[in-house]
Image: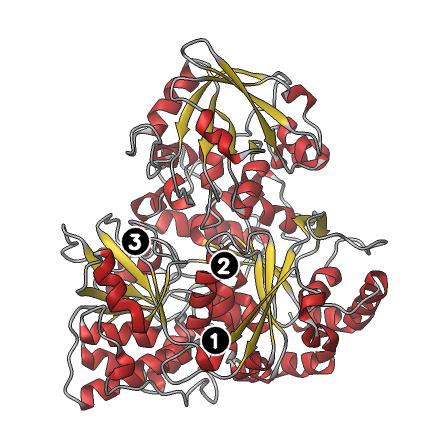
Amino acid sequence: MSQLIAQLYDRLPQSVGAARALLGRPMTFAEKVLYAHLYDPPTAPIARGELASFRPDRVALQDVTAQMALLQLMNAGNRPTAVPATVHCDHLIEAHLGAAEDLAVARSANAEVYGFLRGVAEKYGLGFWEPGAGIMHQVVLENYAFPGGLLIGTDSHTPNAGGLGMCGVGVGGSDAVDAMTGMEWELRMPKLIGVVLTGKLNAWVSAKDIILALAGKLGVKGGTNAIIEYIGPGANTLSATGKATICNMGAEVGATASLFGFDTAMGDYLKATGRADIAEMAQKVADDLTADPEVTARPQDFFDSVIELDLSELEPHVNGPFTPDRATPISQLGKQAEASGWPMAVEAGLIGSCTNSSYQDLARAASVARQALELGMTLACPLYINPGSARTEATAERDGLLAPLRELGAVILADACGPCIGQWHRPDNPDHPNTIVTSFNRNFAKRNDGNPLTHAFVASPEIVMALSLAGRLDANPLNGALTPSTDVVLPDSFVDTTAGYVEPTFGDTPIEIDPASPRLALLEPFPAWDGRPIVDAALLIKVAGKCTTDHISPAGPWLAYRGHLAKISDNLLSGAIDAFTGKTRDIAQAARAYQAAGRPTIIVAEDNYGEGSSREHAAMEPRFLGVSAVAAKSFARIHETNLKKQGMLACTFTNPADYDLIREDDRLGIPDLPDFTPGHGLTLTLTHADGTTDSIPLSHTYSQQQIEWFKAGSALNLMSKEQA
């Protein structure tokens, strides 16, 4: 790995210099990374919003999305991965009794899936991290992330790597397959949002509060198709893992990636995790691993938009419920909760997830726990903690960070995603409106415990500790006797272990899948487009309001079927609200009935459709069940790409108000589909039950290559055809 990084750094000054000359101006750090990773040397500037092709340095896959990705990789041929790649078993471990018990259950229940993932990894040359080794993003940060690199991962929180100056982008499995087969990876050159940080955080304020406050400013789609780059003197006051927390949760505002430039804190983290050689190499090209001085001096001249945050004036935030961008300062939380009718009592506290499970996070939580014990305080509700990796947990155990948490009564869970993604067997799951407070990233309805009555609020680990002790949302810890320690950022060194890591053997053992398996099934190619317009299509559903990937393809118990497309398609849009009934209904059953009758279907949705995770199942399920098109007011970036990759037609209403024209019993069509070309819109026709008609203009962002995916039936179909 060090050799690959050395090669990148050797050519970086020349790559950046050539790009700077091409642009004729100073460069942001994000631009330096992107131009240095273009698939072919550019001959002209690439406009923001224009499609570009890249060569990622690494690919990371978590176990749930890896199943479909590796099934697609198998269909792409027998060549080993063209870029370094790893599989991380972090999603399939249900939190219940504690780490040891839960891991034993997971290994038994998921033995078939783990065996499949390990077998494919060994054959195709991917590293394999076993269950219990840690959450993908924490393991990547500890072992693989490096300043100036480009990482793609089959999880929306891949931008976590930005904490070490690596541009991490969440993608669907098909994009990962492109990179692993040596093909170019496509991305529209992102817009750039500059966030200028000044001042320094106060005691109760953490890096998490920076992104919580920013989410309140940008909203859940304010960062769509953009990279957020953090600059200014305040950035240099943050730890590497604090930076990672901020970059991680950039996904909640729709950002393609988030980045900090290389600094001393990153070097310190690299050294503490046994990578002093990389820190030394990075230091030699440090000027090319940060924004140019002119950018820092005049950010408004180089970013599409600029936001300024004075860290000295920031207070802790608690975001929620039901959306991560509803930001409330802690001083206003009690009043807001009372006015909104939110349940005031806190019934569970949860610390961890890929966003907040670092050594520093555990140290700050432990400092509050020690003070609480000294003052004779007790928890007012159950408290659960999942460290980010086996390495972090072993180091925290060695340094006495977990002891006060256990003494206070916290349950230490496995080093896995757990409740953050709905893998939580919550004891006595309440049948009444209730409040939980977490240090996670998302808080959509039913997200953590499957309970629509649960109001989930997102905060920093120390605020979660404080509210778990107080047991109420209206308790402001800034007015209390506790103060989190800000002294501990890193240990002198982490425990030197790669426990749970399996090197690939590049063996030639056939990958066997039981045809009767309920968990795994080989993929059959989707049918190619027949060249005809869409006529007499049924409206499968007109979705009202927020529709995330959790609504389209829920997690929880459905995680067990992420390797079996026919089975998991039974959950299609099971969380979506029908605009005509105001309720959910069995969309999969309706889709199967239309499919059996040979009738095409169309999905209609509102803004930011597909917000949330990178799960391509949310695109593969409608494709599998015969859906021809999705028309929405707007799409989340990853989901729109996933739809395109799977041969779906994804269009937006040219006039968003036209959404209101669509009636429940309409017959729909897209008559001009045979004329599908880049830059030219399509038409959605509506024939109403009363005989009247409407024609609605649709817009799209398909390139000619993406139209070829559509015609072939999927990107993978086209790849197979070209390689035949």
Q: Amino acid at mark 2?
A: Leu
SS for dot 3: helix
Q: Closer to the observer: label 1 or label 2?
A: 2
Q: Position of residue 405 (x, y in %)?
A: 25, 79
What residue is shown with label 3?
Answer: 108
Is 453 positioned to the left or the right of 58 in the image? left
Q: Quadrant of the C terminus?
A: top right
SS for dot 2: helix
Q: Are marks 2 and 3 in contact (CB under 8 Å)?
A: no
Name the residue nearer the viewer: 82 or 5. 5
Q: Position of residue 115 (x, y in %)?
A: 42, 51
Distance between mark 2 and mark 3 Cα atoms: 43 Å
What residue is shown with label 2?
Answer: 218
Q: Tell me if mark 2 has few (under 14), some (14-19) or many (20+) residues whose alpha carbon lies within 10 angstroms of its own.
A: some
Labelled disc at residue 242: 1
Distance between mark 1 and mark 2 Cα atoms: 20 Å
Q: Position of residue 634 (x, y in %)?
A: 52, 41
Q: Position of residue 124 (x, y in %)?
A: 58, 51
Q: Amino acid at mark 1?
A: Gly
